[in-house]
Amino acid sequence: MKPTRQQEFISKNVLVMGAGISGIAVALILQKLGASVTLSDAKTKEQLKKDLSQLTSAGVKLILGPQNNSLLEKIDYIVMSPGISIYIPLVKEAKARGITVISEIEVAYLLCPTEEIIAVTGTNGKTTTTTLIGEMLKQAAKEVVVGGNIGFALSEEVSGISAEGIVVAEISSFQLEGIIDFHPHIAAILNVTPDHLDRHGSMENYIYTKEQIFVNQTAEDYLILNYDDEAVRAMAARAKSKVLFFTRRKVLDEGIYLQDGQIKISWQGQTTTIVSIADMQIKGMHNVENAMAACAAAFFAGLNFSDITKVLCEFGGVEHRIEPVAVINQVAYYNDSKATNPESSIKALEAFDGHIILIAGGRDKNTDLTEFMKLIQAKAEHLILLGEAAERFSAAAKKQGIKNIHQVDSMASAVNLAHKLARNKEVVLLSPACSSYDMFKNYEERGKAFKELVKALK
Protein backbone atom coordinates (compact mmCIF):
# COMPACT_ATOMS: atom_id res chain seq x y z
CA MET A 1 0.00 0.00 0.00
CA LYS A 2 1.32 3.43 -0.92
CA PRO A 3 1.11 5.85 2.03
CA THR A 4 -1.08 8.84 1.24
CA ARG A 5 0.15 12.32 2.11
CA GLN A 6 -3.09 14.06 3.00
CA GLN A 7 -1.47 15.56 6.10
CA GLU A 8 0.71 17.77 3.88
CA PHE A 9 -2.29 19.99 3.15
CA ILE A 10 -3.81 20.22 6.64
CA SER A 11 -3.84 23.85 7.88
CA LYS A 12 -1.98 24.96 4.75
CA ASN A 13 -2.96 27.95 2.60
CA VAL A 14 -3.59 26.72 -0.94
CA LEU A 15 -4.22 28.81 -4.04
CA VAL A 16 -5.96 26.89 -6.85
CA MET A 17 -5.55 28.51 -10.27
CA GLY A 18 -8.40 28.01 -12.72
CA ALA A 19 -12.11 27.32 -12.21
CA GLY A 20 -12.36 24.43 -14.66
CA ILE A 21 -13.37 20.83 -13.88
CA SER A 22 -10.09 19.92 -12.19
CA GLY A 23 -9.70 23.26 -10.41
CA ILE A 24 -13.13 23.10 -8.78
CA ALA A 25 -12.69 19.43 -7.85
CA VAL A 26 -9.27 19.85 -6.24
CA ALA A 27 -10.38 22.99 -4.36
CA LEU A 28 -13.26 21.12 -2.76
CA ILE A 29 -11.09 18.11 -1.91
CA LEU A 30 -8.30 20.14 -0.29
CA GLN A 31 -10.77 22.29 1.67
CA LYS A 32 -12.38 19.10 3.00
CA LEU A 33 -8.95 17.79 4.02
CA GLY A 34 -8.37 20.82 6.23
CA ALA A 35 -6.58 23.26 3.97
CA SER A 36 -7.60 26.89 3.64
CA VAL A 37 -8.30 27.15 -0.08
CA THR A 38 -8.61 30.13 -2.38
CA LEU A 39 -9.72 29.55 -5.96
CA SER A 40 -8.72 32.19 -8.51
CA ASP A 41 -9.72 32.55 -12.15
CA ALA A 42 -8.90 35.38 -14.54
CA LYS A 43 -12.52 35.41 -15.69
CA THR A 44 -15.20 37.24 -13.73
CA LYS A 45 -18.19 35.39 -12.30
CA GLU A 46 -20.30 36.68 -15.20
CA GLN A 47 -17.77 35.42 -17.75
CA LEU A 48 -17.49 32.00 -16.11
CA LYS A 49 -21.25 31.41 -16.23
CA LYS A 50 -21.01 28.70 -13.55
CA ASP A 51 -22.78 27.99 -10.30
CA LEU A 52 -19.98 28.27 -7.74
CA SER A 53 -22.20 28.05 -4.66
CA GLN A 54 -20.83 24.58 -3.83
CA LEU A 55 -17.40 26.12 -3.38
CA THR A 56 -18.50 29.00 -1.17
CA SER A 57 -20.70 26.67 0.90
CA ALA A 58 -17.65 24.46 1.52
CA GLY A 59 -15.63 27.47 2.70
CA VAL A 60 -13.50 27.99 -0.40
CA LYS A 61 -12.64 31.66 -0.94
CA LEU A 62 -13.24 32.92 -4.50
CA ILE A 63 -11.15 35.64 -6.14
CA LEU A 64 -12.33 36.15 -9.71
CA GLY A 65 -11.08 38.59 -12.32
CA PRO A 66 -7.65 40.26 -12.56
CA GLN A 67 -4.85 38.28 -10.91
CA ASN A 68 -1.87 40.00 -9.28
CA ASN A 69 0.86 39.23 -6.77
CA SER A 70 -1.40 39.98 -3.80
CA LEU A 71 -2.86 36.49 -4.36
CA LEU A 72 0.43 35.03 -3.13
CA GLU A 73 0.33 36.45 0.40
CA LYS A 74 0.73 33.67 3.01
CA ILE A 75 0.28 30.93 0.35
CA ASP A 76 2.01 27.56 0.89
CA TYR A 77 0.93 25.74 -2.28
CA ILE A 78 -0.31 26.72 -5.71
CA VAL A 79 -2.27 24.03 -7.56
CA MET A 80 -2.44 24.62 -11.31
CA SER A 81 -5.36 23.65 -13.51
CA PRO A 82 -4.13 22.32 -16.88
CA GLY A 83 -5.55 25.29 -18.74
CA ILE A 84 -3.30 27.72 -16.84
CA SER A 85 0.32 27.94 -17.97
CA ILE A 86 3.00 27.36 -15.38
CA TYR A 87 5.05 30.02 -17.19
CA ILE A 88 2.81 33.00 -16.35
CA PRO A 89 4.44 35.85 -14.35
CA LEU A 90 2.38 35.13 -11.22
CA VAL A 91 3.73 31.57 -11.03
CA LYS A 92 7.28 32.72 -11.68
CA GLU A 93 6.92 35.15 -8.77
CA ALA A 94 5.50 32.36 -6.58
CA LYS A 95 8.50 30.15 -7.29
CA ALA A 96 10.85 33.04 -6.54
CA ARG A 97 9.14 33.32 -3.13
CA GLY A 98 9.64 29.60 -2.47
CA ILE A 99 5.96 28.66 -2.87
CA THR A 100 5.48 25.05 -4.03
CA VAL A 101 3.73 24.92 -7.42
CA ILE A 102 2.09 21.62 -8.41
CA SER A 103 -0.54 20.32 -10.81
CA GLU A 104 -3.87 18.74 -9.92
CA ILE A 105 -2.35 15.42 -11.08
CA GLU A 106 0.35 15.75 -8.42
CA VAL A 107 -2.32 16.30 -5.76
CA ALA A 108 -4.13 13.19 -7.00
CA TYR A 109 -0.93 11.18 -6.67
CA LEU A 110 -0.30 12.39 -3.11
CA LEU A 111 -3.85 11.40 -2.11
CA CYS A 112 -3.91 8.06 -3.98
CA PRO A 113 -3.60 4.91 -1.79
CA THR A 114 -2.60 2.51 -4.60
CA GLU A 115 0.78 2.09 -6.24
CA GLU A 116 -0.86 0.61 -9.34
CA ILE A 117 -1.06 3.70 -11.53
CA ILE A 118 -1.06 3.47 -15.33
CA ALA A 119 -0.40 6.81 -17.03
CA VAL A 120 -0.79 7.52 -20.75
CA THR A 121 0.49 10.55 -22.63
CA GLY A 122 1.25 11.54 -26.22
CA THR A 123 0.16 14.16 -28.71
CA ASN A 124 -2.60 11.97 -30.16
CA GLY A 125 -4.44 8.81 -29.15
CA LYS A 126 -4.43 9.33 -25.37
CA THR A 127 -8.18 9.08 -24.83
CA THR A 128 -8.68 5.97 -26.97
CA THR A 129 -5.72 4.19 -25.36
CA THR A 130 -6.68 5.17 -21.81
CA THR A 131 -10.28 4.09 -22.37
CA LEU A 132 -9.16 0.77 -23.87
CA ILE A 133 -6.95 0.02 -20.88
CA GLY A 134 -9.81 0.82 -18.51
CA GLU A 135 -12.16 -1.49 -20.41
CA MET A 136 -9.61 -4.31 -20.36
CA LEU A 137 -9.19 -3.99 -16.60
CA LYS A 138 -12.97 -3.96 -16.12
CA GLN A 139 -13.26 -7.07 -18.30
CA ALA A 140 -10.79 -8.75 -15.95
CA ALA A 141 -12.98 -7.71 -12.98
CA LYS A 142 -10.32 -5.40 -11.54
CA GLU A 143 -11.16 -2.44 -9.33
CA VAL A 144 -10.35 0.48 -11.60
CA VAL A 145 -10.90 4.22 -11.99
CA VAL A 146 -10.19 6.18 -15.16
CA GLY A 147 -9.50 9.92 -15.03
CA GLY A 148 -7.04 12.72 -15.65
CA ASN A 149 -7.43 14.55 -18.93
CA ILE A 150 -10.54 12.46 -19.62
CA GLY A 151 -13.85 12.72 -17.79
CA PHE A 152 -13.59 13.70 -14.13
CA ALA A 153 -10.60 15.20 -12.33
CA LEU A 154 -8.11 12.56 -11.19
CA SER A 155 -7.98 13.96 -7.65
CA GLU A 156 -11.72 13.31 -7.42
CA GLU A 157 -11.52 9.83 -8.98
CA VAL A 158 -8.78 8.46 -6.69
CA SER A 159 -10.75 9.33 -3.57
CA GLY A 160 -12.82 6.17 -3.99
CA ILE A 161 -10.07 3.70 -4.89
CA SER A 162 -8.64 1.12 -2.47
CA ALA A 163 -5.00 0.09 -2.05
CA GLU A 164 -5.72 -2.93 -4.27
CA GLY A 165 -7.27 -0.90 -7.10
CA ILE A 166 -5.76 0.37 -10.35
CA VAL A 167 -5.79 3.97 -11.57
CA VAL A 168 -5.66 4.65 -15.32
CA ALA A 169 -4.86 8.27 -16.11
CA GLU A 170 -4.74 10.22 -19.34
CA ILE A 171 -2.06 12.85 -18.78
CA SER A 172 -1.51 15.93 -20.94
CA SER A 173 1.72 17.90 -21.25
CA PHE A 174 0.00 20.73 -19.37
CA GLN A 175 -0.60 18.45 -16.39
CA LEU A 176 2.98 17.16 -16.48
CA GLU A 177 4.32 20.71 -16.10
CA GLY A 178 3.53 20.65 -12.38
CA ILE A 179 4.59 17.23 -11.13
CA ILE A 180 7.19 16.56 -8.45
CA ASP A 181 6.70 13.03 -7.07
CA PHE A 182 4.11 11.64 -9.55
CA HIS A 183 5.20 8.04 -10.13
CA PRO A 184 3.17 5.69 -12.34
CA HIS A 185 4.07 2.00 -12.19
CA ILE A 186 3.26 1.72 -15.91
CA ALA A 187 3.67 4.67 -18.28
CA ALA A 188 3.05 4.93 -22.01
CA ILE A 189 4.12 7.60 -24.50
CA LEU A 190 2.24 7.14 -27.75
CA ASN A 191 3.81 9.79 -30.01
CA VAL A 192 5.18 13.31 -29.95
CA THR A 193 4.40 15.70 -32.81
CA PRO A 194 4.37 19.53 -32.78
CA ASP A 195 1.51 20.78 -30.60
CA HIS A 196 1.03 23.45 -27.92
CA LEU A 197 4.32 25.06 -28.96
CA ASP A 198 2.77 28.45 -28.20
CA ARG A 199 2.83 27.36 -24.54
CA HIS A 200 5.94 25.18 -24.35
CA GLY A 201 8.07 27.46 -26.51
CA SER A 202 9.91 24.79 -28.49
CA MET A 203 9.72 21.17 -29.56
CA GLU A 204 12.60 20.39 -27.18
CA ASN A 205 10.64 21.77 -24.21
CA TYR A 206 7.53 19.88 -25.32
CA ILE A 207 9.45 16.58 -25.46
CA TYR A 208 11.08 17.30 -22.09
CA THR A 209 7.64 17.93 -20.56
CA LYS A 210 6.27 14.66 -21.95
CA GLU A 211 9.25 12.79 -20.47
CA GLN A 212 8.23 13.89 -16.97
CA ILE A 213 5.75 11.02 -17.01
CA PHE A 214 8.62 8.57 -16.39
CA VAL A 215 11.13 10.77 -14.57
CA ASN A 216 10.33 9.18 -11.17
CA GLN A 217 10.13 5.58 -12.41
CA THR A 218 12.62 2.96 -11.20
CA ALA A 219 13.86 -0.38 -12.52
CA GLU A 220 10.73 -1.97 -10.99
CA ASP A 221 8.44 -0.01 -13.33
CA TYR A 222 7.49 -0.27 -17.01
CA LEU A 223 7.66 2.24 -19.85
CA ILE A 224 5.82 1.65 -23.13
CA LEU A 225 7.22 3.58 -26.11
CA ASN A 226 6.36 3.95 -29.80
CA TYR A 227 9.33 2.57 -31.74
CA ASP A 228 8.09 4.17 -34.99
CA ASP A 229 8.33 7.69 -33.53
CA GLU A 230 12.03 8.61 -33.46
CA ALA A 231 11.64 11.21 -30.71
CA VAL A 232 9.77 8.72 -28.52
CA ARG A 233 12.17 5.86 -29.30
CA ALA A 234 15.09 8.03 -28.15
CA MET A 235 13.47 8.45 -24.72
CA ALA A 236 14.43 4.86 -23.84
CA ALA A 237 18.02 5.98 -23.30
CA ARG A 238 16.87 8.37 -20.56
CA ALA A 239 14.58 5.92 -18.74
CA LYS A 240 15.44 3.92 -15.63
CA SER A 241 12.41 1.64 -16.05
CA LYS A 242 11.93 -1.51 -18.14
CA VAL A 243 11.11 -0.43 -21.72
CA LEU A 244 8.77 -2.22 -24.10
CA PHE A 245 8.47 -0.86 -27.63
CA PHE A 246 5.45 -1.18 -29.89
CA THR A 247 5.63 -0.87 -33.68
CA ARG A 248 3.52 -1.55 -36.75
CA ARG A 249 6.48 -1.27 -39.13
CA LYS A 250 8.86 -4.07 -38.12
CA VAL A 251 9.04 -7.36 -36.22
CA LEU A 252 10.77 -6.98 -32.86
CA ASP A 253 12.72 -9.63 -30.97
CA GLU A 254 11.07 -8.21 -27.86
CA GLY A 255 8.03 -5.94 -27.87
CA ILE A 256 4.58 -5.61 -29.46
CA TYR A 257 4.39 -5.57 -33.25
CA LEU A 258 2.19 -6.11 -36.28
CA GLN A 259 2.87 -9.17 -38.43
CA ASP A 260 0.64 -10.50 -41.20
CA GLY A 261 -2.27 -8.40 -39.97
CA GLN A 262 -1.98 -9.65 -36.39
CA ILE A 263 -0.87 -7.91 -33.21
CA LYS A 264 1.75 -10.03 -31.44
CA ILE A 265 3.80 -9.67 -28.27
CA SER A 266 7.24 -11.11 -27.62
CA TRP A 267 8.48 -10.79 -24.05
CA GLN A 268 11.08 -12.79 -22.14
CA GLY A 269 11.27 -15.50 -24.78
CA GLN A 270 7.52 -16.01 -25.21
CA THR A 271 5.57 -14.91 -28.32
CA THR A 272 1.76 -14.67 -28.32
CA THR A 273 -0.72 -13.56 -30.97
CA ILE A 274 -3.20 -11.18 -29.34
CA VAL A 275 -5.68 -10.25 -32.09
CA SER A 276 -6.16 -9.94 -35.83
CA ILE A 277 -6.70 -6.29 -36.72
CA ALA A 278 -9.50 -7.42 -39.05
CA ASP A 279 -11.45 -8.39 -35.93
CA MET A 280 -11.08 -4.93 -34.31
CA GLN A 281 -13.94 -2.46 -34.66
CA ILE A 282 -11.95 0.79 -34.39
CA LYS A 283 -10.75 2.18 -37.71
CA GLY A 284 -7.30 3.28 -38.86
CA MET A 285 -3.68 2.28 -38.38
CA HIS A 286 -3.32 4.90 -35.65
CA ASN A 287 -5.82 2.85 -33.65
CA VAL A 288 -3.66 -0.24 -34.21
CA GLU A 289 -0.90 1.71 -32.42
CA ASN A 290 -3.31 2.71 -29.65
CA ALA A 291 -4.39 -0.93 -29.28
CA MET A 292 -0.75 -2.07 -29.05
CA ALA A 293 -0.01 0.41 -26.27
CA ALA A 294 -3.16 -0.66 -24.41
CA CYS A 295 -2.21 -4.33 -24.79
CA ALA A 296 1.21 -3.64 -23.31
CA ALA A 297 -0.24 -1.79 -20.31
CA ALA A 298 -2.81 -4.51 -19.67
CA PHE A 299 -0.14 -7.21 -20.02
CA PHE A 300 2.11 -5.56 -17.44
CA ALA A 301 -0.93 -5.11 -15.18
CA GLY A 302 -1.22 -8.91 -15.14
CA LEU A 303 -4.24 -9.47 -17.38
CA ASN A 304 -4.91 -12.67 -19.31
CA PHE A 305 -4.72 -12.41 -23.09
CA SER A 306 -8.32 -13.65 -23.39
CA ASP A 307 -9.61 -10.52 -21.59
CA ILE A 308 -7.39 -8.24 -23.69
CA THR A 309 -8.53 -9.85 -26.97
CA LYS A 310 -12.22 -9.75 -26.06
CA VAL A 311 -12.13 -5.99 -25.44
CA LEU A 312 -10.20 -5.30 -28.65
CA CYS A 313 -12.84 -7.18 -30.65
CA GLU A 314 -15.77 -5.38 -28.99
CA PHE A 315 -14.53 -1.82 -28.39
CA GLY A 316 -16.22 0.63 -30.75
CA GLY A 317 -14.15 3.74 -30.05
CA VAL A 318 -14.61 6.93 -28.06
CA GLU A 319 -16.92 9.85 -28.64
CA HIS A 320 -15.60 12.59 -30.96
CA ARG A 321 -12.78 10.42 -32.38
CA ILE A 322 -13.71 9.20 -35.90
CA GLU A 323 -17.15 8.55 -34.41
CA PRO A 324 -19.84 7.30 -36.82
CA VAL A 325 -22.82 9.67 -36.64
CA ALA A 326 -25.25 8.71 -39.40
CA VAL A 327 -25.62 7.46 -42.96
CA ILE A 328 -27.86 9.71 -45.05
CA ASN A 329 -28.53 8.96 -48.73
CA GLN A 330 -25.60 6.52 -48.70
CA VAL A 331 -23.26 9.24 -47.35
CA ALA A 332 -21.53 8.42 -44.05
CA TYR A 333 -20.96 11.24 -41.53
CA TYR A 334 -18.11 11.05 -39.00
CA ASN A 335 -17.38 13.26 -35.99
CA ASP A 336 -13.66 13.68 -35.33
CA SER A 337 -13.91 16.87 -33.28
CA LYS A 338 -11.16 15.65 -30.95
CA ALA A 339 -8.65 16.19 -33.78
CA THR A 340 -7.28 19.51 -32.56
CA ASN A 341 -4.02 19.44 -34.54
CA PRO A 342 -3.04 18.52 -38.13
CA GLU A 343 -1.33 15.26 -37.12
CA SER A 344 -4.54 13.97 -35.55
CA SER A 345 -6.56 14.96 -38.63
CA ILE A 346 -4.00 13.23 -40.86
CA LYS A 347 -4.68 10.00 -38.97
CA ALA A 348 -8.41 10.44 -39.56
CA LEU A 349 -7.92 11.03 -43.29
CA GLU A 350 -5.71 7.94 -43.48
CA ALA A 351 -8.53 5.85 -42.00
CA PHE A 352 -10.59 6.29 -45.21
CA ASP A 353 -9.94 5.27 -48.81
CA GLY A 354 -10.81 8.73 -50.13
CA HIS A 355 -13.87 10.58 -51.51
CA ILE A 356 -14.04 12.76 -48.39
CA ILE A 357 -15.86 16.03 -47.81
CA LEU A 358 -13.67 17.48 -45.06
CA ILE A 359 -14.83 20.13 -42.58
CA ALA A 360 -11.83 21.77 -40.87
CA GLY A 361 -10.79 24.95 -39.08
CA GLY A 362 -11.20 26.64 -35.74
CA ARG A 363 -8.66 28.38 -33.54
CA ASP A 364 -5.33 28.17 -35.34
CA LYS A 365 -2.33 26.70 -33.50
CA ASN A 366 -0.05 27.92 -36.30
CA THR A 367 1.40 24.44 -36.86
CA ASP A 368 2.82 23.40 -40.22
CA LEU A 369 0.08 22.41 -42.68
CA THR A 370 2.14 20.96 -45.54
CA GLU A 371 1.58 17.22 -44.96
CA PHE A 372 -2.03 17.80 -43.94
CA MET A 373 -2.82 19.67 -47.16
CA LYS A 374 -1.00 17.11 -49.31
CA LEU A 375 -3.22 14.38 -47.89
CA ILE A 376 -6.36 16.51 -48.36
CA GLN A 377 -5.36 17.01 -52.00
CA ALA A 378 -5.08 13.23 -52.40
CA LYS A 379 -8.17 12.15 -50.48
CA ALA A 380 -10.76 14.94 -50.34
CA GLU A 381 -13.29 15.99 -52.95
CA HIS A 382 -14.11 19.22 -51.11
CA LEU A 383 -12.56 21.20 -48.24
CA ILE A 384 -14.96 23.26 -46.12
CA LEU A 385 -13.28 25.75 -43.78
CA LEU A 386 -14.61 27.76 -40.85
CA GLY A 387 -13.31 29.67 -37.85
CA GLU A 388 -10.27 31.84 -37.25
CA ALA A 389 -7.96 29.47 -39.17
CA ALA A 390 -9.99 29.55 -42.39
CA GLU A 391 -7.87 32.12 -44.25
CA ARG A 392 -4.50 30.51 -43.46
CA PHE A 393 -5.85 27.03 -44.17
CA SER A 394 -7.31 28.24 -47.48
CA ALA A 395 -3.96 29.75 -48.54
CA ALA A 396 -2.13 26.55 -47.62
CA ALA A 397 -4.70 24.47 -49.52
CA LYS A 398 -4.33 26.56 -52.69
CA LYS A 399 -0.55 26.18 -52.43
CA GLN A 400 -1.00 22.40 -52.61
CA GLY A 401 -3.28 22.61 -55.63
CA ILE A 402 -6.55 21.88 -53.81
CA LYS A 403 -9.38 23.14 -56.02
CA ASN A 404 -12.72 22.80 -54.21
CA ILE A 405 -12.25 25.10 -51.21
CA HIS A 406 -15.25 26.62 -49.44
CA GLN A 407 -15.33 29.07 -46.52
CA VAL A 408 -18.38 29.27 -44.25
CA ASP A 409 -19.21 31.21 -41.10
CA SER A 410 -20.81 28.54 -38.90
CA MET A 411 -20.97 24.82 -38.22
CA ALA A 412 -24.57 24.81 -39.46
CA SER A 413 -23.47 26.27 -42.79
CA ALA A 414 -20.64 23.74 -43.01
CA VAL A 415 -22.93 20.75 -42.43
CA ASN A 416 -25.58 22.01 -44.84
CA LEU A 417 -23.00 22.65 -47.55
CA ALA A 418 -21.41 19.23 -47.03
CA HIS A 419 -24.86 17.66 -47.36
CA LYS A 420 -25.45 19.44 -50.68
CA LEU A 421 -22.02 18.53 -52.07
CA ALA A 422 -21.81 14.88 -51.00
CA ARG A 423 -22.53 12.11 -53.49
CA ASN A 424 -23.37 8.44 -52.91
CA LYS A 425 -20.79 6.53 -50.85
CA GLU A 426 -18.72 9.61 -50.09
CA VAL A 427 -17.77 10.50 -46.50
CA VAL A 428 -18.43 13.75 -44.66
CA LEU A 429 -15.73 14.10 -42.01
CA LEU A 430 -15.46 16.77 -39.33
CA SER A 431 -11.76 16.74 -38.43
CA PRO A 432 -10.83 20.35 -37.62
CA ALA A 433 -7.04 20.19 -37.06
CA CYS A 434 -7.64 23.14 -34.72
CA SER A 435 -8.81 23.82 -31.21
CA SER A 436 -12.43 24.87 -30.75
CA TYR A 437 -12.15 27.96 -28.58
CA ASP A 438 -12.98 30.51 -31.27
CA MET A 439 -16.55 29.23 -31.67
CA PHE A 440 -17.15 26.62 -28.94
CA LYS A 441 -16.40 26.02 -25.27
CA ASN A 442 -14.43 22.84 -26.06
CA TYR A 443 -14.11 20.10 -28.66
CA GLU A 444 -16.94 18.15 -27.01
CA GLU A 445 -19.38 21.00 -27.55
CA ARG A 446 -18.19 21.32 -31.15
CA GLY A 447 -18.65 17.60 -31.78
CA LYS A 448 -22.10 17.54 -30.23
CA ALA A 449 -23.16 20.52 -32.35
CA PHE A 450 -21.99 18.69 -35.47
CA LYS A 451 -23.86 15.53 -34.50
CA GLU A 452 -27.08 17.39 -33.79
CA LEU A 453 -26.90 19.19 -37.13
CA VAL A 454 -26.25 15.92 -39.00
CA LYS A 455 -29.12 14.13 -37.28
CA ALA A 456 -31.39 17.07 -38.16
CA LEU A 457 -30.64 16.44 -41.84
CA LYS A 458 -32.64 13.22 -41.64
Image (cartoon, rainbow, N blue to C red):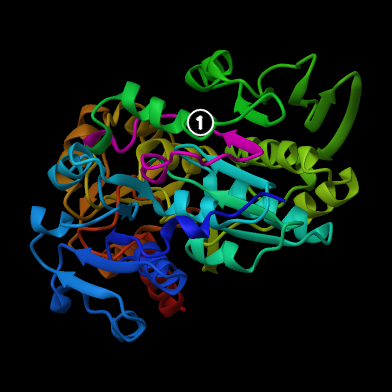
Quadrant housing residue 393: top left
Residue 421 in sight here: yes
What segment carries the magenta color? 174-198
Residue 333 in sight here: no
Which residue sits furthest front?
A: 11
Q: Position of residue 2 (x, y in %)?
A: 67, 49
Q: Is residue 173 above or below residue 329?
A: above
**Left or right position of 54 against 180:** left
Name the amino acid, label 1: Asn
Q: Position of residue 267 (x, y in %)?
A: 83, 23
Q: Is residue 49 above or below residue 162?
A: below
x 27%, y 50%: residue: 361
Residue closer to the observer: 67 or 292: 67
| 254 drawn magenta | no
Q: Which residue is mark 1?
A: 191
Quadrant housing residue 314: bottom right
Q: Residues within 10 Å of mark 1 (few under 14, many from 20)?
A: many
Q: Is residue 332 above or below residue 237?
A: below
Q: Callout 1: helix, strand or loop?
A: loop
Magenta segment, prevailing SS (helix, strand or loop):
loop
Q: Position of residue 195 (x, y in %)?
A: 33, 36
x 35%, y 58%: residue: 421
| 180 drawn magenta | yes
Residue closer to the observer: 281 or 333: 281
x 31%, y 60%: residue: 14
How many numbered marks are there? 1
Q: Position of residue 327 (x, y in %)?
A: 55, 67
**Left or right position of 404 against 206:** left
